[in-house]
Image: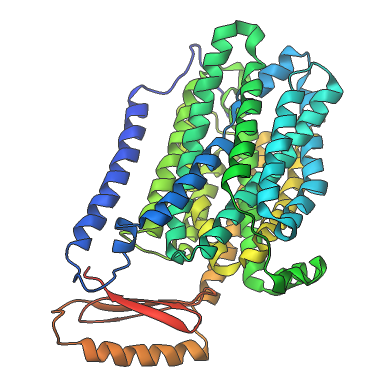
């Protein structure tokens, strides 16, 4: 393939930033406008599911905002913005950097997995505080130009990342249940977490650039110092504002091995865990490879101008997920996630063939991050359906084990020995995402099979629906949608109105919604 090397510095066109902002703002405004418009057509004596997202109660909003405030602070990426530049300033070569990162992921593989499992039994609040302490230690250790100090800093940050990926979400979902809030309101928190984390990363990049520009080349360590301050503030806020929650006594009295065996015995949880593994590996590999892929063959590119496009793409994907998870177009995650995984694999398939046109690469990388923004909250919603809160952190920690193992292999073979091309790693990502799509397809088929008890309940509800026909509700399209707490769904259509019925174990409630 003929290779054309750009002679001038490439950067995204200015209109792209305006387009991303308009897409995010327009999608958020459009969602609330459509939900509000629909809510006005619903009888006042009924409790529609779409109204549940238009008029969220103040206690839930207070809980959500207090959690998200700390979560967004914890998701900052100040220490990562100039991490590689800081190592280069310390005189560390790319091969040694690869070994540092590989050691960090190896420590996370061995120790981080057990920290996540232990959080389910010792307390999620304690685990979140441990995350802040590890993050604080890692950031402070990077301030010293000593190899053993950098090794300790990389290991601490890797362990902190492992805890962050499971403990915050698990604490929130468990506390959500303890406070008695509706299960479907979790979706509103999940998409906001994904959206806000991307916005936090953008703010971290802006603050890091400001600090470095303030001190010049000698200010490369300032972002790490600022991240240490943020971690300290997070630890104080968690200590003062959060309550502790652990596994229930029924689970806590079992041995950890028995609890893990419970997870392994459910084929739906195993499928979901493998989907999470494939997704985690693809995202981690992407953030290691996107810069080397774009600047290949010595091309000059404004990397700092592309990063906001990638974060903005994640935000757009998160808003798109809110339309599907929280209305106005309610949809089971299994129904659309298969297509999203296939789209994500397509966006990395062209870089896997070593395609080198910068504009198309940036467009494909933005498409991949749109998919990431959709997948993250959707998988979190699926975990709420299939995985018990008592073992949620354990499942998430175990799902990271294969991903971390492959990342260590890639960093050593590709980063240190240079025996693995970037295109080959992208091929691994494509294969993983396609297998994840296959697992989601199986999960969708299994979840759509109704058991005998559900059939009996459906017959009873159909009898109720027949009594409602022809009365004061007019000529509506009637659809029955049933969601079991353990993740079994059933739907049926008729010609007069729409009824949404949510079953929680043996208890259920119904509402009429005009489409």
Kindly tell me whether residue 303 is visible in this rendering.
no
Residue 287: quadrant of the picture: top right
Left or right side of 406 for 269: left
Where residue 461 appears, x then y in whole percent? 35, 88
Instruction: Return the residue found at the far right.
Output: 148
In this view, 454 is above or below 376? below
Say which quadrant the N terminus sits in.
Answer: top right
- Establish if 395 lies above or below 211: below
From the viewer's side, name the closer residue of 377 and 271: 377
> Where 22 falls versus 241 (above or below)?
above
Question: Where does the image place residue 505, in percent across and percent down from the top left?
Answer: 51, 80
Q: Quadrant of the C terminus?
A: bottom left
Q: Residue at x 55, y 36 (%)?
A: 73
Q: How is the image coloured?
A: rainbow
Q: Residue at x 47, y 62 (%)?
A: 333
Residue 285, horizontal then vertical, whole percent: 65, 40
Q: Is residue 189 visible?
A: yes
**Outermost residue, front side:** 240
């Amino acid at each position: 393939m003929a290779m054309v090397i750009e002679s001038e510095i490439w950067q995204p066109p200015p209109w792209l930033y305006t387009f991303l902002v308009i897409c995010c703002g327009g999608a958020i405004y459009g969602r609330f406008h459509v939900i509000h418009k629909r809510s006005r057509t619903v009888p006042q004596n009924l409790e529609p599911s779409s109204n549940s997202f238009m008029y969220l109660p103040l206690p839930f909003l207070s809980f959500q905002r207090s959690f998200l405030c700390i979560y967004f602070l914890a998701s900052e990426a100040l220490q990562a913005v100039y991490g590689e530049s800081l190592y280069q300033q310390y005189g560390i070569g790319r091969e040694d950097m690869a070994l540092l990162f590989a050691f960090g992921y190896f420590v996370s593989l061995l120790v981080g997995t057990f920290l996540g499992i232990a959080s389910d039994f010792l307390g999620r609040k304690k685990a979140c505080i441990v995350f802040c302490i590890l993050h604080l230690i890692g950031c402070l250790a990077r301030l010293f130009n000593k190899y053993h100090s950098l090794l300790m800093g990389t290991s601490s940050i890797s362990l902190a990342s492992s805890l962050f990926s499971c403990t915050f979400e698990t604490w929130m979902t468990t506390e959500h249940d303890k406070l008695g809030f509706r299960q479907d309101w979790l979706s509103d928190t999940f998409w906001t977490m994904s959206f806000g984390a991307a916005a936090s990363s953008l703010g971290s990049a802006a603050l890091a650039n400001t600090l470095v520009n303030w001190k010049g080349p000698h200010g490369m360590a300032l972002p790490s110092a600022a991240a240490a301050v943020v971690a300290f503030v997070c630890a104080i806020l968690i200590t003062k504002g959060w309550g502790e929650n652990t596994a229930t006594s029924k689970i806590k009295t079992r041995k950890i091995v028995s609890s893990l065996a419970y997870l392994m015995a459910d084929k739906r949880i195993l499928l979901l865990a493998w989907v999470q593994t494939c997704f985690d590996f693809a995202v981690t590999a992407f953030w290691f490879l996107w810069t080397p892929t774009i600047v290949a063959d010595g091309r000059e590119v404004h990397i700092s101008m592309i990063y906001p496009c990638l974060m903005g793409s994640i935000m757009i994907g998160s808003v798109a997920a809110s339309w599907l998870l929280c209305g106005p177009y309610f949809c089971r995650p299994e129904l659309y996630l298969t297509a999203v995984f296939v789209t994500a694999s397509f966006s990395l398939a062209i870089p896997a063939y070593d395609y080198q046109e910068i504009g198309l690469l940036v467009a494909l990388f933005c498409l991949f991050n749109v998919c990431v923004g959709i997948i993250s909250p959707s998988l979190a919603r699926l975990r709420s359906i299939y995985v018990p809160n008592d073992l949620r952190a354990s499942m998430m920690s175990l799902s990271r084990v294969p991903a971390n193992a492959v990342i260590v292999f890639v960093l050593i073979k590709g980063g240190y020995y240079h025996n693995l091309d970037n295109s080959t790693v992208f091929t691994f990502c494509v294969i993983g995402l396609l297998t994840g799509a296959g697992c989601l397809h199986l999960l969708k088929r299994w979840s759509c099979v109704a058991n005998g008890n559900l059939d009996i309940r459906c017959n009873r509800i159909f009898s109720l629906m027949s009594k409602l026909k022809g009365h004061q509700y007019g000529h509506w399209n009637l659809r029955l949608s049933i969601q079991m707490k353990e993740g079994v769904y059933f739907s049926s259509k008729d010609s007069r109105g729409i009824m949404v019925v949510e079953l929680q174990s043996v208890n259920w409630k119904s509402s009429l919604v005009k489409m």
